[in-house]
Amino acid sequence: MCQKAIYPGTFDPVTYGHIDLIQRAVGIFGELTVAVGHNFHKQPLFEVQERVALLAQAVGDIEGVAVVEFKGLVVDFARAQKAKVLIRGLRMVSDFEYEFQMALTNRKFSPEVETIFLMPQESYSYLSAKLLKEAASLGADVSSFVPDFVQDALRKKLCKV
């Protein structure tokens, strides 16, 4: 059975860890919407339209994946999309407490939407967009963590800062 799932996040920027989870999720569920959020509590480096464009370029050849932006509660977005599954990535134990709390809160708002946790390949388990941006801002070559066009976008963006 093909089940639609939502993988929400900030994706600032998209990394190989995100792409790995996208491939895993679409392999399980058949149809995946990658939902790029307007997170007003974070100050992303890239505007939401830039994040959507980078993600679309990164996953454009993966069948069954759509990339869109959303505002508001992710469970409201999931209901509007007629999706019953949210995908969340867990890299390290340190992610678990926050993700567990968010999953339980989402369940309270929308009991029909389930949260499924997926782990990336071990080689991406330590990768975080925050650390990646910091390294790139200091001139590090981050091409082993992101596609080349994302590294180029990071360099252009960070040179403006």
Image: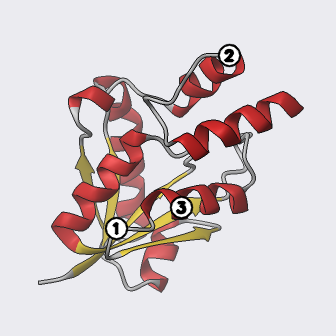
Q: Which residue is mark 3?
A: 57
Q: Earlier in the sequence, mark 1 or mark 3?
A: 3
Q: Which residue is mark 1?
A: 62
Image location (x, y in percent) of residue 77: 51, 75
For residue 2, above or below residue 141: below
Q: Is residue 97 left or right of residue 2?
A: right
For residue 56, above or below residue 31: above
How far apart marks 1 and 3 lie (CA) works out to: 10 Å
Image location (x, y in percent) of residue 110: 39, 71
Q: Quadrant of the N terminus?
A: bottom left
Which label belongs to residue 125? none
Q: As shown in the figure, which amino acid type bears the numbered disc 2?
A: Gly
Residue at disc 1, secondary structure: loop
Mark 3 nearby-residue class (10 Å; few <14, some 14–19, many ≥20): some
Q: Is residue 119 left or right of residue 66?
A: left
What residue lies at 56% left-to-right and 21% top-to-bottom? 141
Mark 2 nearby-residue class (10 Å; few <14, some 14–19, many ≥20): few
Mark 1 nearby-residue class (10 Å; few <14, some 14–19, many ≥20): some
Image location (x, y in percent) of residue 126: 36, 23
The residue sitting at the right extreme is: 160
The residue sitting at the left extreme is: 1
What residue lies at 73% left-to-right and 50% top-to-bottom? 40
Q: As shown in the figure, which amino acid type bears the numbered disc 1?
A: Ile
Residues 100 and 131: in front is 131
Residue at disc 3, secondary structure: helix
Q: Which residue is mark 2?
A: 139
Answer whether labels 1 and 2 touch (C-beta < 8 Å). no
